[in-house]
Image (cartoon, rainbow, N blue to C red):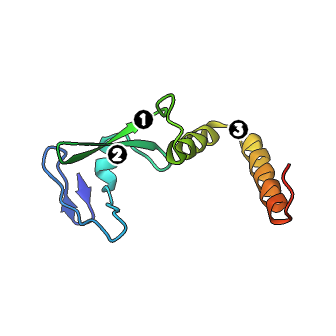
Amino acid sequence: MRCGKEVISVNKPIYKILDAKGRVLIPREARSAAGMDYGDIVRLDVQNGRVSVKKVNIVEVGDKSPEAVEAFVHAAIREMPEDSQIAIAARLLELIQQRKEGRHG
């Protein structure tokens, strides 16, 4: 695989620098090899000092953490028809406006 000018082998380690916010860029070729694309939900597992990243299609049942709920909503919306996406966006904007005005509906 090619990443910019470097060649990436899926069987060799890839070294990246962790930024100040804890982010790491996964090269496009590595994401492609793992079947990952923009907007996908990934699961991070930490075990024995190792962090693994795996693409998932659904969030585990019972996980009600804000991150899991947000990931689920993003994944669900991405699969909806455009008119449904627009209707949801309009409703969200309406709710935000109501909060700004001090009303809850």
| Front residue of this view, candidates 66 and 16 | 66
Q: Amino acid at mark 2?
A: Ser
Query: In screen coordinates, is 68 left or right of 3?
Result: right
Q: Residue furthest top?
A: 61
At label 1, the amino acid type is: Val
C-beta proximity under 8 Å, tags 2 and 1: no
Find residue 56 and name its label. Answer: 1
Relative height, residue 12 to residue 79 (above, below): below
Left or right: 59, with 43 as reference point: right
Q: Quadrant of residue 8?
A: bottom left
Residues at marks 2 and 1, CA–CA distance in whole angstroms: 14 Å
Q: Which mark is residue 32?
A: 2
Badge 2 or badge 1: first in the primary sequence: 2
Instruction: Report how many numbered discs are placed on residues in the image.
Output: 3
Dot 1 falls on a residue whose secondary structure is strand
Q: Which residue is mark 3?
A: 81
The residue drawn where x is 18% and y is 60% is 15
Label 2: which secondary element: helix
Q: Earlier in the sequence, mark 1 or mark 3?
A: 1
What is the x, y in percent for residue 11?
Answer: 14, 43
| Tag 3 secondary structure | loop
Residue 10 locus on image (x, y percent): 19, 45
User: Of the residues tagged 1 and 3, which is closer to the observer?
Assistant: 1
